[in-house]
Amino acid sequence: MQIRTFAAALIAAGCLTTPLQARAAIESRDVPVATITVTGQGSVSRAPDLATVAATIVTNDDNATRALSENNRRYAALLAKLGALGIAAADVGSTSIQSYFNPRPNTPVQAGQLFGFVVTRNVEIKVAALAQIGATVDAATAAGATQINGVSYGFRDRHAVERAAMAAAVADAYAQAQAIAAAAHVQIVRVLRLGNEPAPGRIMPMAAMSLASKAEAPVPTTISPSDLDVTSSISATYVVR
């Protein structure tokens, strides 16, 4: 009797482990499963809350020290004028500064060419109050910037906007998969795989402006940004039955 009971227990144990082994085989993909793979697209439109003004200060002189000193003077004037607008010095940075010697040739030269020691400083100004973009451009011009290279817009918390676009992409992917499943008379069981590649937001540049010559009665600069579109692409694979 004891031998028979023990044998029955072994048989019962074998029956219980069979579903577990089958499940493990499915999870390890030893057993093929039916899937649907789609690519979802999501997009959100938000008003930007950050602008970056790019400017260049170029100075030249026959003396290297004077050329650099004049460039430094204009940069200091720029910081002072921006400070009057409430823009902190921490939001203004020199992205590059270069000094080189350009000898004057014996042949005729083109108008606007600079000779001697030429110092070029590229500056980026972050502006949180978008209503002050125009005033920032005017301040840079008044301080002696020789060129405004453009204005780009973005978000102080870009990740939050990207997450919203990502959620929209996931919803789009699921809606596509549901439509395919319904047409094929199958049901979605679970998500097998998700992967995303967020696309960059649309940048609204302002055309570069040369500031070599100034009007006698300057008109204040006005710049109005438009909304930015942030998109996300999601690749999703669903298991169906």
Image: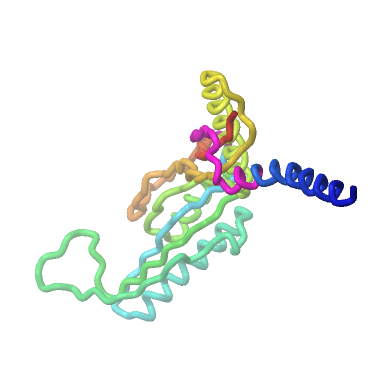
**220 sits left or right of 9 in the view:** left
Residue 228 versus residue 121 in the image, above or below: above
The residue lying furthest to the right in this view is 1
Depth order, front residue of 121/222:
121
* 106 inside magenta stretch: no
Depth order, front residue of 155/14:
14
Residue 22 versus residue 126 in the image, above or below: above
Find residue 18 and report its image quarter.
top right
Q: How many marks?
A: 0
**42 sits left or right of 64 in the view:** right
**199 sits left or right of 147 in the view:** right
User: What colour scheme was applied to this rendering of the protein?
Assistant: rainbow
Residue pictured at 76% horizontal, 43% vertical: 16
Query: Is residue 42 visible in this depiction of the protein?
Result: no
Residue pictured at 11% horizontal, 65% vertical: 108
Query: Is residue 60 visible in this depiction of the protein?
Result: yes
Could you tell me which quadrant the C terminus lies in? top right
Measured from the top left, where is residue 213 in percent x and y?
A: 33, 52
Residue pictured at 60% horizontal, 59% vertical: 83
Find residue 61 and report its image quarter.
bottom left
The residue lying furthest to the front in this view is 1
Measured from the top left, where is residue 200 in percent x and y?
A: 48, 45
| Magenta part of the chain | 23-46
Depth order, front residue of 74/158:
158
Residue pictured at 60% horizontal, 46% vertical: 25
Measured from the top left, where is residue 145 in percent x and y?
A: 42, 59
Measured from the top left, where is residue 32 in percent x and y?
A: 53, 39
* 24 inside magenta stretch: yes
The residue lying furthest to the left in this view is 107
